[in-house]
Amino acid sequence: MSIHNSRRSILIAVGIGVLAVSGLFAGRLVAHQMGGHMGGGGAPRMFKRLSRDLDLSDTQQSQIRAILRAHADEIETHVKAGMDSRRALADAILTEPTDEAAIRSRAQNLGNAHGDGAILFARIRSEVWPLLTSQQQKKMVTIHSRMRDHGDEALKSLDSFLRGAN
């Protein structure tokens, strides 16, 4: 895998993380979208942590939950599509003999699912953002920046590993 492809994968993962942090507090669904499984209590724990980090009031928490519930079907549909696309790509990668056309096709499908997720995130974020105070919005921008920096750090670490420095 080239550095460019690795960076792209990392950026996609970071984008999905931003999706979770910036509005999709539906933790179990987001956990699957991020490719991991948060286990028992993941959604409430993630929501509680972000609520604490942003110092959300009870009213804000209720309003955000209502927004997420209003989009529940869309979120579930998107997450399932993403999971199915990831599984199909993983299966194509492991199939012998290697079928590059099938891998590219499934990677394109996964990219489309990520694009759809980004659009869904943007729509939900546009509903959540006005509920936040300017201070909370600044904190959210800081959280987003930290996540982006983690992606950069992961890329540097990968490059170092691939070049034999570690």
Image: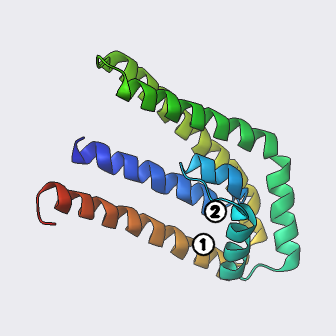
Which quarter of the picture shows residue 2? top left
Q: Which amino acid does label 1 sit on?
A: Met
Q: Judge by depth and name the residue closer to the eye, 34 or 54.
A: 34
Q: Could you say where residue 58 lies in the image, as x and y percent from the top left?
A: 86, 77
Mark number displayed over residue 3: none
Q: Kindly state the secondary structure of the residue where label 1 is placed.
A: helix
Q: Kindly state the secondary structure of the residue where label 2 is placed.
A: loop
87 over 126 or under it: above or below: above
Q: Residue furthest left?
A: 164
Q: Judge by depth and name the residue closer to the eye, 153 or 40.
A: 40
Q: In which quarter of the image is the C terminus?
A: bottom left
Mark number displayed over residue 140: 1
Q: Name the residue under label 2.
A: 22
Q: Could you say where residue 141 lies in the image, as x and y percent from the top left?
A: 55, 71
Would you say residue 113 is visible in this rendering?
yes
Residue at 36%, 46% in the rendered image: 8
Residue at 62%, 59% in the rendered image: 38
Would you say residue 122 is visible in this rendering?
no
